[in-house]
Amino acid sequence: MFPKCQLFGTEGCHLCEQAESLLMPLVLRGLSVELIDIAESERQVEHYGLRIPVLRRTDSGAELDWPFTPERLRVFLM
């Protein structure tokens, strides 16, 4: 079973779109990912602005910065 995650990004970010595409096969297998648009929070822009897309586990708070590969994702989600 996958942990619940959040994907921090913003609209129009091509790297964020790539990250979403990479995550989609896992979503189809049961991964729950909440998309968070950092543009809606000044604090999130300051924290994530230069790092997006960032995948965050809600159970542990661990974060995976882009670029992530299928292998890095697998290890991160275990």
Image (cartoon, grey):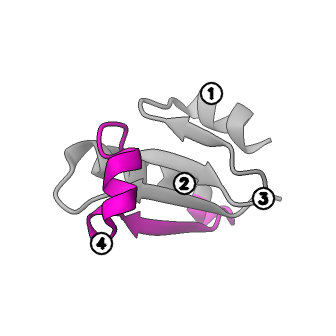
| Residue type (three-letter) at the residue carrying disc 4 | Glu
- Percent across and percent down for residue 49 are 30, 46
| Residue type (three-letter) at the residue carrying disc 2 | Pro
Q: Nearer the viewer, mark 2 or mark 4?
A: 4
Query: Disc 2 or 1, which lies upstream in sequence?
Result: 2
Which residue is pictured at 58% across the width and 62% down the height? 27
Is residue 45 inside the magenta stretch? yes
Which image quarter is the N terminus in?
bottom right
Real-space Cα separation, disc 2 to disc 1, in angstroms: 13 Å
Real-space Cα separation, disc 3 to disc 1, in angstroms: 20 Å
Q: Secondary structure at mark 1?
A: helix
Real-space Cα separation, disc 4 to disc 3, in angstroms: 23 Å
**Front in this rendered view, residue 60 or 69:** 60
Q: Secondary structure at mark 2?
A: helix
Query: Disc 3 or 2, which lies upstream in sequence?
Result: 2
Quadrant of residue 29 within the rendered picture = bottom right
Q: Return the residue at label 2.
A: 25
Q: Return the residue at label 3.
A: 59
Query: Disc 4 or 3, which lies upstream in sequence?
Result: 4
Q: Secondary structure at mark 4?
A: helix
Quadrant of residue 5 within the rendered picture = bottom right
Query: Disc 2 or 4, which lies upstream in sequence?
Result: 2
Which image quarter is the C terminus in?
top right
Q: Is residue 11 above or below residue 47?
A: below
Real-space Cα separation, disc 2 to disc 4, in angstroms: 27 Å
Q: Which mark is residue 71?
A: 1
